[in-house]
Image (spheres, helix red, strand yellow):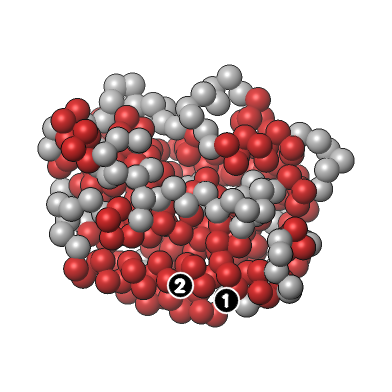
Amino acid sequence: MTVTIVDKRAATGTLIGLALGDALGFPTEFNDVPSILAKCGPWRQMRLSTPAVVTDDTQMTLAVGKGLRAAMDRGVLAPEGMAEAVRKEFVAWNRSPDNNRAPGNTCLRACALLEDPDLPWQDASQIGSKGCGANMRVAPVGLVPGLSDEQRSGAAQLQAALTHGHPTALAASDLTAHAVRLLAEGVEPRNLLVSLVTYAEENRSHYSHRWLGDLWTRSQDGTPEEFIARGWDECRAILDRLAGAVDGVDPDTDPCLATGAGWIAEEAFATGLLCFLLFPDEPVTAIRRAACTSGDSDSIACLTGAFAGAHLGAEAWPTDWADRIEYRGDLLTLGALWDA
């Protein structure tokens, strides 16, 4: 399905695409590719379930989005206000009876600690975790209009650090939000990787004390620069793997074999982006490819859907799919706010 977009409404397209990928990948997570094919048939014909139920990936994306909206309703986006607002949304998500979609242990542990109002969020952060829960939810940061580069980078890393404190989780979240923003602004997919490599190199030794505070002191690194460089170095390495895969991988081969299974942040980013770059003008095919993978299929597919939606906009998605996605009203409300 090739789509030409005029007025693309990138924020709406990103959020709906993320949720569609999440819902398409939900039934296939924890399955290998032969099992998925046996259950779902040919991957290019995978169908969306009815109802189209999502996972914690979409739930936490909405938590980040609502937290950003609340923080910005009070004025200019700043670390203290954002941390307070997103922390509140994460705690509410953790308490919700709808939090029953096999959420990650890191998110559960950190969110339980975030309930203590006297505990600095840096002490709740799981400093050793770089799970994909850090960046499968970061797309809203790439969509909010009017942010400076410093605000967008800081906000992307902060939302990750509330639960996942590993430097690679921070860098991968920053990189994911930056990719969403570039695509929403019209950067062509063929030029995206060069821009991302440049961004990773420019930010390698920049630790944002303003947004992260003393988080780095919970690690074993000697300086904040050493701490954050570890994360960017891992992201830089996965970008090299991704560049090779885009030109050399067979689209009918499991993408996880090229860029990783996606359980960790940098691999989720790379494999989700790979599925998009294999089919940059075929969004439904891209999320189907992402959902038929041997790794963390729902998180990979939700990132693929976010990238495709940022690039092609709201009209990229079949109406009969978009109309039945869970949390549709919340997704459309945020999308309309940021598209306005």
Q: Any mark on residue 204, and which? A: 1
Tell which circle, 1 or 2, labels the residue nearer the N-terminal end. 1
Question: From the viewer's perspective, is residue 317 above or below residue 308?
Answer: above
Check disc 2: other Cα within 10 Å, few if <14, some if 14-19, many if 20+: many
Check disc 1: other Cα within 10 Å, few if <14, some if 14-19, many if 20+: many
Q: Amino acid at mark 2?
A: Arg
Q: Amino acid at mark 1?
A: Arg
Disc 2 target residue: 236
Q: Position of residue 96 (x, y in %)?
A: 61, 23
Q: Position of residue 89 (x, y in %)?
A: 66, 36
The residue positioned 45% from the left and 72% from the top of the image is 236
Callout 1 touching callout 2 (CB < 8 Å): yes
The residue positioned 28% from the left and 25% from the top of the image is 49
Query: Residue 304, can we see it?
Result: yes
Query: Residue 18, can we see it?
Result: no
Q: Is residue 87 left or right of residue 265?
A: right
Q: Nearer the viewer, residue 211 or 151?
A: 211
